[in-house]
Image (spheres, rainbow, N blue to C red):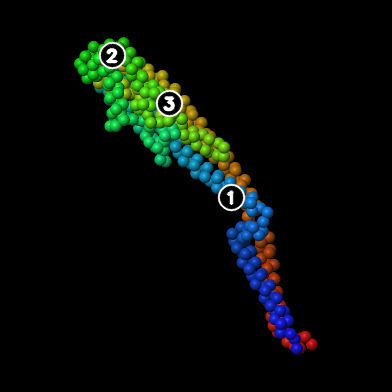
């Protein structure tokens, strides 16, 4: 009589083989569907560390691309504001030429000056993605006071009127203003008024911006400016010109003094338009750097993705061939199991 234990062993062996083949079949079918190796550690043991490094590289690239999208939007917003500032300056120059000999010169100076000052403040307070792009490193708050608004703007306007009173000995609304000569208004403009808008006066009374523009990372070991600073000389000079026209244009000046004021305002604007253009050029350079960084990141991403694919991707032909072999093995194992189960003692005699 055949040993029962031996019989069980003989019939169990094919069943174990079938179970193992079925598990492998499920794995291979999953790989064929996903295109990825199911167990990298088992199949590519020596490359697991490299695969993790590639994961980190791709994650860093994605982070840079996301940050660059925000930086690009902020630089674009900065450029749009600079275009508005330039257009505003050009319009103000034309207005000063018109106002030079117009009967309503005082009203033109005041109206155009106050509007231009507010427009400049609005442009310099441009906010993109939660950052005031002309705030420099202090991008959390509006950098520039608006002379037509309460708070810091009103205080700045009061400082201009106080400087006028100190220099001339009477307030701007005093009828004695009619005695001011053209030379005297120019001396005031070039002296006490200009001092309120020099580097220290601008930061004390008008600007909360830092001198340095915000530096942002755009790629590994690459940085660029993510905006600008309202403390650029061109901006403070424009605000000086606009504020002078807006605050003192309505004063009861005689024609000579009013004409001298209009000339000083115009000359200031003309002189600093090149400074604004230089800021536009710097922002444009930063935009080019971001575009170049994005191109480099795309190349890096492609190389890293290919290297990761070489590690993770399953060969579809090889996988399909193995699946066919497994199915053939399972079918053979089932056939063998069936034959063994039909065996009797007679077959062994």
> Mark 1 or mark 2: which comes first in sequence?
1
Q: Rounded to the nearest whole Å, what is the CA distance between mark 1 and mark 2? A: 71 Å
Who's the residue at 26% across and 18% down the image? 165
Q: Is residue 233 visible?
A: yes
* Rendered-image quadrant of the N terminus: bottom right
Residue 321 figure quarter: bottom right
Residue underneath mark 1: 55
Within 10 Å of disc 1 (Cα), the crowding (few <14, some 14-19, many 20+) is some
Who's the residue at 53% across and 38% down the image? 218
Q: Secondary structure at mark 1?
A: helix
Residue underneath mark 3: 232
Residue 221 figure quarter: top right
Who's the residue at 59% across and 61% down the image? 33
Q: Secondary structure at mark 2?
A: helix
Looking at the image, is 13 positioned above or below residue 290? below
Who's the residue at 28% across and 17% down the image? 166
Tell me whether circle 3 and circle 1 mark residues in contact (CB < 8 Å): no
Looking at the image, is 66 positioned above or below residue 261? below
Q: Residue furthest right?
A: 349
Within 10 Å of disc 2 (Cα), the crowding (few <14, some 14-19, many 20+) is many
Nearest to the eye among marks 1 and 2: give it: 1
Q: Which mark is residue 257?
A: 2
């Amino acid at each position: 009589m055949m040993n029962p234990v031996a019989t069980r062993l003989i019939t169990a062996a094919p069943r174990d083989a079938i179970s193992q083949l079925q598990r492998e079949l499920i794995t291979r079918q999953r790989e064929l569907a996903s295109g990825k190796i199911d167990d990298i550690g088992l199949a590519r043991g020596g490359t697991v560390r490299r695969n993790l490094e590639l994961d980190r590289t791709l994650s860093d690239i994605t982070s840079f691309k996301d940050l660059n999208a925000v930086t690009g939007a902020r630089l674009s917003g900065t450029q749009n504001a600079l275009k508005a500032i330039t257009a505003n300056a050009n319009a103000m120059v034309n207005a000063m030429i018109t106002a030079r000999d117009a009967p309503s010169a005082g009203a033109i100076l005041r109206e155009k000056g106050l509007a231009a000052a507010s427009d400049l403040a609005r442009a310099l307070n441009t906010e993109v993605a939660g950052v005031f792009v002309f705030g420099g490193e202090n991008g959390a708050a509006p950098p520039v006071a608006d002379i037509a608004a309460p708070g810091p703007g009103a205080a700045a306007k009061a400082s201009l009127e106080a400087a006028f009173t100190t220099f001339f000995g009477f307030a701007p609304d005093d009828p004695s203003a009619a005695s001011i000569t053209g030379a005297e208004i120019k001396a005031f403009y070039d002296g006490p008024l200009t001092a309120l808008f020099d580097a220290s006066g601008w930061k004390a009374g008008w600007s909360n911006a830092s001198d340095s523009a915000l530096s942002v990372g755009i790629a590994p070991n690459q940085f660029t400016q993510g905006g600008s600073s309202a403390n650029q000389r061109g901006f403070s000079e424009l605000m000086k010109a606009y504020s002078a026209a807006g605050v003192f244009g309505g004063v009861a000046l005689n024609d000579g003094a009013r004409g001298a004021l209009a000339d000083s305002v115009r000359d200031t604007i003309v002189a600093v338009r090149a400074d604004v253009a230089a800021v536009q050029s710097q922002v444009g350079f930063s935009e080019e750097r971001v575009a170049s960084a994005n191109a480099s990141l795309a190349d890096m991403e492609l190389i890293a993705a290919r290297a990761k694919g070489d590690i993770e991707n399953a060969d579809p032909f090889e996988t399909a061939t193995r699946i066919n072999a497994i199915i053939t093995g399972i079918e053979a194992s089932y056939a063998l199991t069936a034959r063994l189960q039909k065996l009797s003692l007679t077959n062994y005699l």
